[in-house]
Image (spheres, rainbow, N blue to C red):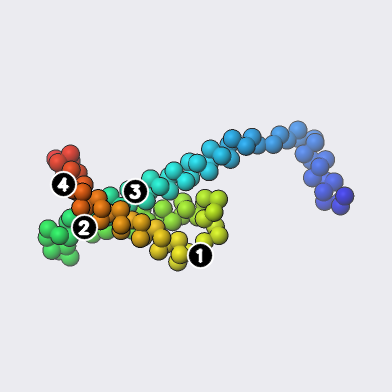
Amino acid sequence: MSEFSKKIAVKLKNEKALPIPKWKFVLRRVFVFGFFLFLTILASLIFSILISRLDEIDWWLDLPSFVWLILVIFVLVMSYLCFKKTSCGYRCRMITTLVMIIAAVVVIGIVGYLLGFPEMFDEYAM
């Protein structure tokens, strides 16, 4: 054993360090992946609302449309950062990850728009 390894072994023995249970790592992994899925679905729903707003009015003159756009970008960035914390996310290149997330958001957002989610949101919000 090297000198460094001996020092660490003595320090662990003196401090009575216990290993962290596996369930804590599993719970963290499930939480991070679930939060990633939540953020992706949230970005998709916001994107469907943005599509409906762009369809109705001149979006470059409307401040709420810019707020929705900024919100979509913010949630996309948060989703990307959350994906990088998953057990397989660190291996993917940034551009590949962003393209996959954006494609998922656009597809789910268009499906949400076609299913009428923005109208349901407007009825519930009013």
Q: Residue at x 62, y 37 (%)?
A: 22
Tag 3: residue type?
Answer: Ile
- The first of marks 1 and 3 along the sequence is 3
Above or below 52: residue 18? above
Above or below 10: residue 90? below
**Which part of the image, by quadrant, shows the C terminus?**
top left
Q: Residue at x 13, y 63 (%)?
A: 58
Name the residue tied to disc 4: 119
Q: Quadrant of residue 64?
A: bottom left
Q: Quadrant of residue 123?
A: top left
Circles 4, 3 touching at the beta carbon (< 8 Å) = no
Badge 4 density bin: few <14, some 14–19, many ≥20, Cα 10 Å:
few
Name the residue tied to disc 2: 51
Tag 4: residue type?
Answer: Glu
Badge 2 density bin: few <14, some 14–19, many ≥20, Cα 10 Å:
many
Secondary structure state at the residue bearing disc 2:
helix
Tag 2: residue type?
Answer: Ile
Query: Does the rendering let one see residue 62?
Result: no
